[in-house]
């Protein structure tokens, strides 16, 4: 593109010179008037004095008119050229602006195209592939998008939560049953008790509240333990009595021992009697099941 420059100087002088030369040469009115006056003078129609007057009045007027008109025309000509140059410069700037706007519009179109592509990609990622009708309305979407997966996850979480709630309810019921079992076992095993002083250090005191006629499992186990202890003690003293009686019988048969006061026979006989007495004590109903001395 050509560079257009505009100065602040009006080129009037050269144009004025050209106009004056054109107006005073060739077939101009000035030359024709000059030639006509010369012909009249050559033919004797006018005298030298008349010629001078005519030249002074007519030719001088024509020359003044031509110079004045040439100057005015030169100024208008220069102004018109300046206006045209300014118009060209203005049009050039407008064309530059249009070129920039075209580049901007092209960039905006490219940006809009990229944004549309990104929007489609994002829509596919979020909602999955969509099916549209002829009017652009969505008919259906598949289950490959994030929204569908979030819905599936939410549904699974709801199901999981419901299952966990059911499991929690079952655990609560189990806890209640365990509490009932502990209470029932405690009542069966130990009876009815009340406690006081429950704190960080535990229970400080317990009071038995069940009736004495209420036989608990611990009472029964205690009785069984007593009877077992009696049985063990009974067997021990029975074995001891059998051994000591056998020794006594052997001593009598061998005539080894004497049975007088302070004799070994008396000691052996007293041992047998004491063992028999302890065996008798072990078979009584004493809770202690301890043999008598």
Image (cartoon, rainbow, N blue to C red):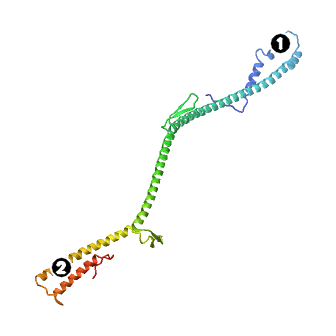
State the residue lying farthest toward the top: 43
Q: Position of residue 106 (x, y in %)?
A: 58, 32
In this picture, is 87 found above or below 183? above
Can you see residue 12?
A: no
Q: Is residue 110 left or right of residue 64?
A: left
Where residue 135 appears, as percent x and y from the top left, is 58, 29
Image location (x, y in percent) of residue 237:
23, 77
User: Of the numbered discs in the image, which one, if any, rests on residue 245?
Assistant: 2
Q: Quadrant of the C terminus?
A: bottom left
User: Would you identify the image quadrant in which residue 109 lies?
Assistant: top right
Mark 2 or mark 1, which is nearer the start of the sequence?
1
**Viewer-proximal residue among 126 and 246:** 246
Q: In this orientation, which residue lies closer to the viewer: 21 or 197? A: 197
Q: Is residue 284 left or right of residue 254?
A: right
Question: Residue extending furthest bottom?
Answer: 261
Q: Please indicate, yes or no, whether residue 173 appears anywhere in the rendered image.
A: yes
State the residue position of label 1: 36
């Amino acid at each position: 593109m050509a560079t257009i420059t505009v100065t602040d100087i009006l080129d009037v002088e050269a144009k004025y010179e050209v106009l004056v030369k054109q107006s005073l040469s060739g077939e101009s009115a000035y030359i024709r008037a000059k030639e006509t006056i010369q012909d009249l003078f050559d033919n004797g129609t006018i005298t030298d004095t008349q010629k001078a007057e005519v030249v002074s009045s007519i030719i001088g007027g024509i020359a003044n008119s031509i110079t004045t008109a040439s100057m005015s025309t030169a100024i208008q000509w220069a102004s018109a050229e300046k206006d045209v140059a300014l118009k060209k410069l203005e049009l050039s700037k407008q064309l530059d602006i249009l070129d920039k706007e075209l580049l901007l519009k092209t960039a905006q179109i490219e940006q809009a195209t990229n944004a549309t592509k990104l929007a489609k990609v994002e829509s596919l990622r979020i909602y999955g592939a969509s099916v549209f009708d002829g009017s652009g309305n969505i008919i259906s979407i598949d289950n490959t998008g994030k929204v569908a997966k979030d819905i599936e996850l939410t549904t699974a979480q709801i199901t999981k939560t419901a299952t966990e709630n059911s499991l929690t309810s079952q655990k609560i019921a189990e806890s209640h049953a365990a509490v009932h079992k502990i209470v029932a076992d405690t009542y069966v095993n130990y009876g009815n008790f009340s406690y006081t002083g429950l704190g960080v250090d535990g229970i400080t005191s317990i009071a038995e509240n069940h009736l004495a006629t209420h036989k608990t499992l611990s009472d029964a186990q205690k009785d069984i333990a007593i009877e077992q202890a009696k049985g063990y003690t009974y067997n021990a003293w029975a074995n001891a009595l059998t051994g000591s009686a056998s020794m006594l019988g052997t001593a009598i048969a061998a005539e080894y021992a004497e049975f007088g006061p302070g004799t070994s026979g008396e000691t052996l006989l007293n041992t047998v009697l004491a063992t028999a007495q302890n065996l008798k004590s072990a078979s009584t109903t004493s809770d202690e099941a301890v043999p008598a001395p």
